[in-house]
Image: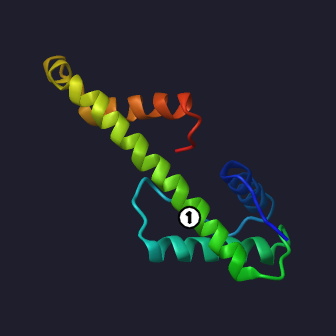
Amino acid sequence: MTFTIDLLTFFSLFIINKLIYPTKFVILSTMRLNKLQIEHLAFSIVKGLLKDNVIITEDRQKIVKEVEDVIARELEKEDKLDEQVKDILKDKLEEIRSTNVDYYEMFKMVKSKLAEKENIVI
């Protein structure tokens, strides 16, 4: 049996499930996750989905690994997006400084626009 699901569907199911069955749920801020944190997050997500009977599987570890892979791929997409934004803003740095625009705010705005354009969930 092959289990495939895109990230948006996966997290939509997870969040809808949490809205229907509220429990303590921590929303991650924009922070980098290391491998151990990704493993723990994936394990916790799968554990919650199994507990609430949102998914059924005979191979829990396989599902955990697939969720880890999805999370890692999405973080890689965001890293690439950050690099694109840095490249764009590098060319506009003098203009940003001369107009007293906050670099971080400009970074967030450009990142948001690029993410929307490239259909990346951030």
Q: How is the image coloured?
A: rainbow
Residue at the image position 63 percent from the left and 74 percent from the top: 65
Q: Nearer the viewer, residue 63 or 122?
A: 63
Q: SS for tag 1?
A: loop
Location of residue 50 in the rendering, given as x and y in whole percent from the top left corner: 79, 76
Mark 1 is on which residue type?
A: Val
Query: What is the x, y in percent for residue 55?
Result: 83, 69
Q: Residue at x 83, y 67 (%)?
A: 54
Q: Is residue 8 above or below residue 90?
A: below
Q: State the image coordinates of residue 122 (x, y, percent, origin top left).
A: 52, 44
Image quadrant where residue 22 sits: bottom right
Q: Is residue 36 above or below residue 77?
A: below
Instruction: Please name the residue shown 43% across and 53% down the image.
Output: 30
Name the residue tied to disc 1: 26
As rendered, which of 78 and 13 lies closer to the eye? 78
Residue at figure coordinates x 48%, y 55% from the top left: 75
**Mark 1 closeness class: few <14, some 14–19, many ≥20 residues within 10 Å:** few
In the image: residue 69, left or right of residue 17: left
* 43 left or right of 74 in image: right
1 in relation to 116, above or below: below
Report whether 17 appears left or right of 102: right
In the image, 51 versus 43, the foreground residue is 43
Residue 77 picture location, percent across and down: 49, 48
- The N terminus - image quarter: bottom right
